[in-house]
Amino acid sequence: MGCHFSSLLRDFDTNVSKYAYLNHNNFNLNPSPVVVDYGSIRLNGGTVVNVTRIIKHEDVNWVTGDSDIALLKTDPMKLDSIHAQKIGLPQQDFGLGVGRIVNISGFGWTDNYGPYSKNLKYGSAKVLSEKECKEGFPQLTEKQFCAGDFGLGTTDFCYGDYGGPAANWGILYGIQSTHKNRYWCGLPKQPGVYTNVSQFVDWIKKTITNNSDNNELRKLTSFN
């Protein structure tokens, strides 16, 4: 099983596709069937590495999408090209202002009910207000945010993009998580819902520290 898209933090890989993790439950979160394909703008065209450990957030809620985040530990990667680089984290509890632009990308469906894209697609989405978000996704929590064109629904992620980034200036602010209907996307007043990464920075650092055999990794200097 491969991950369509994710974001790289040292030798850990953040991935928050709750639908992938529903599938992973068939393996009792055994990482052996899971690989990461990275370093290419074409689907299945990059370098493949094995996932050696999967750590999902202990408070994840499959119904609301709350705490929809996990870490994947992989075999070593070469993050030295224009297509494969590390990404930074925001400060814990950073306030993502309404109207901020985030860049999203993925290989998911290009229309409702498919097909998948063979090439990496990307776009820019505007962070929406809590009021707008709850109109399309009433169960929104403080650990989530919405982004898109509220009245038009023209820029959005779709099925198969889940786990992909919402980033800007080299910082990972959000992770593509869910919709009111996970098979429908790009609809007016039903914006995409993202995991708010700033609410989990402390958890990410703690989890990496507690699950790493590398003393240098424990210092987490790249997150300061």
Image (cartoon, helix red, strand yellow):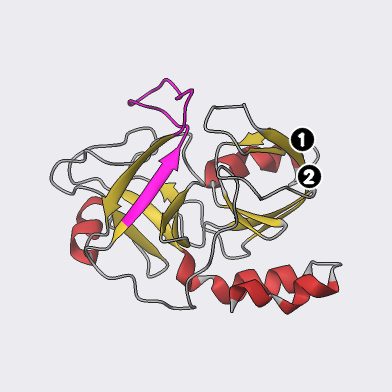
Q: Is residue 111 left or right of residue 11?
A: left
Going by the numbered disc 1, the residue's amino acid type is Pro
Image quadrant where one finds the C terminus: bottom right
- Give how far across and how far down residue 144 sits, in percent: 39, 62
Q: CA distance from mark 2 to mark 1?
A: 7 Å
**Can you name the residue that lies furthest to the front here?**
81
When asked about the image quadrant of residue 147, the answer is bottom left
In the picture, the quarter occupied by the N terminus is: top right
Q: Nearer the viewer, residue 69 or 106?
A: 106
User: Is residue 60 at least partly visible in the picture?
Assistant: yes
Residue in view at x 80 percent, y 73 percent? 216
Q: Is residue 213 above or below residue 206?
A: above
Question: In this figure, which residue is indicated by the disc labeled 1?
Answer: 33
Indicate the position of residue 102 as horizontal and vertical percent values: 34, 55
Residue furthest out toward the left: 151
Q: Is residue 10 above or below residue 156?
A: below
Mark 1, Cα crowd under 10 Å, few <14 / some 14-19 / many 20+, is few
Q: Nearer the viewer, residue 61 or 56?
A: 56
Mark 2: amino acid: Asn
| Residue at 38% in and 70% down | 142
Residue 82 in the image: state x and y as whole percent: 55, 45
Q: Quadrant of residue 39?
A: top right
Name the residue located 72 percent from the left edge and 35 percent from the top edge: 48
Q: Which residues are magenta?
A: 102-120
Residue 103 in picture, x, y percent from top left: 36, 50
- As drawn, 212 above or below 74: below
Residue at disc 2, secondary structure: loop
The secondary element bearing badge 1 is classed as loop
Whether the residues at callouts 2 and 1 have beta carbons within 8 Å, the answer is yes
Residue 197 position (above or below residue 8): below
The residue tagged 2 is 30
Among the 4 quarters of the image, the one containing residue 131: bottom left
